Image (spheres, helix red, strand yellow):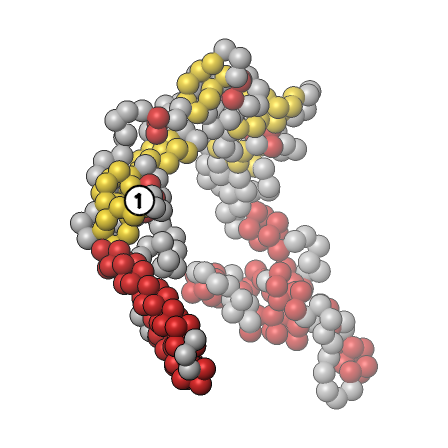
Amino acid sequence: MDQGLERTSRSKFEGGDAAWEEEKMGSYKTSEVRLVEIQEHLCSEVDRAQKQCEGLAEDHERLLEEWWFEGQAESLHDWLCIGKLAVCCPIHHFGPNCLPCTGGVEKPCSGHGKCKGDGTRKGNGECLCNDGYNSTLCDACASGFYESFRDEKNVLCSACHKACNGPCTAAGPKSCVACKEGWRMETERGCIDVDECLVKPSPCAGNTFCVNNEGSFSCLACDKACQGCDGDGPDMCDKCAEGYTLDEERAMCVGDNAARERNLQMARYITYAGLTVATCIILQRHTILAAIVGLSVAVYITGSEYYLSYIHQPDDPAVQMPVTMSSNYAVDD
């Protein structure tokens, strides 16, 4: 109904002699024409329980018309729901007799909770406190929260530090009464994180490595080149996995194909050097022939390197595009 009133608030009589209609039929604001327009779309703007809305509108059509033509002195909610049908209560009242909610109608539940049955003829008026508050009036801090402000009219409760196990006296890890698992108490600093990854043997099983988090740790998968590792990448392996060998020069595990590729690369460079030396020897005896051979060698080297660089892809984790490794699994203390 309120939406219909808002929708037609700027409307007026349409067509014909609007001035005559205003004079004979009264103001559009309180006219039957406006009421009919509102009733035609009364429940169309209701998203939920539309059929229930249509049933109520039909059952109480006479009362709606009575309220409309009596001048709408009260809001429809107060006149119909509270006064005539007696199914509602004023805000911050509850129950069959519309009693005040716990804490009073001005600030029920100290402003930190909801009154059970508020605005209805149901409920018991007790407070359902917001997170962080408790007591009958929701005027005290729950476990895991502390008083960050209090005066004669209000109290503000804030969450304890995540390291605290239960209550605290103020903000920060130094104010914890006790520490959660994964943290330990120190006299000067309060609760500090325990680095589970320093424990030997490692808490991570299989082909994974440990990463410390605040209050817990995670186990991430080792690089595929590794059989056991201390961190991410082929340079952090305990041993090389099958199909990989240790490249001592780079101190990392590389694929066997990559090792063969480097041997072939070395042989290729030696060949290039030999061809260059041969060209220099020929140059001493025949300049034109040396120029032809030198040009052929240059074309050969350029073509070979182009082919190997862009066509052949070595199986070497050191030169492949890095892939972000997601967590294999996470373990919380």
In the figure, is residue 121 to the left or right of 65?
Answer: left
Q: Is residue 247 above or below residue 180?
A: below
Q: Quadrant of the N terminus?
A: bottom right
Q: Nearer the viewer, residue 299 or 20?
A: 299
Instruction: Find numbered disc 1 in the image and state the secondary structure of the residue it sits on.
Output: loop
Instruction: Find residue 271 and report its horizontal and vertical position in percent.
Output: 32, 68
What is the three-letter code of the residue carrying label 1?
Glu
Crowding near the residue tagged with mark 1, few <14, some 14–19, many ≥20 C-alpha atoms within 10 Å: few
Q: Is residue 168 something one can see in this rendering?
A: no
Residue 34, quarter of picture: bottom right
The residue that label 1 is drawn on is: 248
Q: Residue furthest front?
A: 285
In this rendering, the count of numbered labels is 1
**Residue at image x 55%, y 51%?**
81
Q: Nearer the viewer, residue 186 or 56?
A: 186
The residue sitting at the top extreme is: 187
Judged from this view, the residue extending furthest toward the left is: 242
Q: Nearer the viewer, residue 52 or 287?
A: 287
Residue drawn at point x = 26 percent, y = 49 percent? 225
Give the quarter of the figure containing the C terminus.
top left
Q: Position of residue 167 (x, y in %)?
A: 48, 19
Q: Can you give x and y, in whole percent of width and height, for residue 255 in the image?
A: 25, 55
Left or right: residue 34 compared with residue 127: right
Which residue is at 19% across, 53% downward?
A: 243
The front one of 254 and 281 is: 281
Q: Position of residue 252 (x, y in %)?
A: 32, 46
Residue depicted at 36% across the width and 59% down the height: 320
Could you tell me if residue 275 is visible in this image? Answer: yes
